[in-house]
Every structure is written in C-alpha cells, then in structure tokens.
Amino acid sequence: MSQTEAFPSLVPRKMSSEELARAIRQDIAAELDAINLYQAHIDATDDDRARKLLAHVRDEEKTHVGELLALLKVLDPDAQRLLEEGLEEAAPILKKGR
Ligand SMILES: [Fe+2]
C-alpha cells in the first residue's frame, strides 16, 4: 500500500476536482508499480509463454500511464505546464549525454 494514500479505497461521496486529481496521481503511481512488478516476474521466469503474456500486460500498463497523464493534465491546470517544463529542462541534459 502506498504511503501517500490520498483516500480510503472506497470514497463514499463525490470527489472535488482537486481530490480527483490526487486520486489520478495515486492511480498513476499504482500503474508504475504494476509495470515494475510485471517486469520482475518476467525476469524471474524462463517460461516463454508467461514472459510473452506478462510483457503484453506490462506494456498495457504503460499505455494506462499515458491515458491517466492525459486525464491529469485536464484535471490539474498546473500539471500540463510543469510537465512541459520538466521535458524542456531535461532535453538539453539528455542531448549532451549522447
Ligand atoms: Fe493498468
């Protein structure tokens, strides 16, 4: 369980936009954890059928991260700007590393 749990598992009311944005961030963290977990299981087996299926599921989780990020950008007005700032700050650093 995340140490930054924003809500109990079930929210017995409608969430505000700020609460929904926080929940989506928590969902993104869960997707990232799932990616690492599936990869660990892939690394820990020689069963090619399992490796292939787990890789497929892992990649679906990566897609879910993208979908949830798109939603977060809509819900959190600062998220879009700050994510783009991060991309811009990282780009020259990464380019130098080539
Ligand atoms: Fe997912």
Image (tube, grey):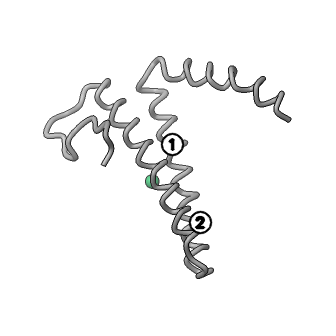
Say which element carries label 1: helix
x and y percentages locating residue 11 in the rendered image: 18, 40
x and y percentages locating residue 33 in the rendered image: 45, 51
Residue wearing tag 1: 67
Name which residue type carries label 1.
Glu
Specify the farthest residue to the left: 12
Taking the image in four quarters, ligand 1 sits in the one at bottom left
In this view, 3 is above or below 85:
below
x and y percentages locating residue 71 in the rendered image: 46, 34
Residue wearing tag 2: 55
Q: Nearer the viewer, residue 22 or 90?
A: 90
In this view, 73 is above or below 51:
above
Q: Nearer the viewer, residue 97 or 77?
A: 97
x and y percentages locating residue 26 in the rendered image: 37, 39
Q: Is residue 63 left or right of residue 76?
A: right
Label whose residue precedes the other's in the sequence (1 or 2): 2
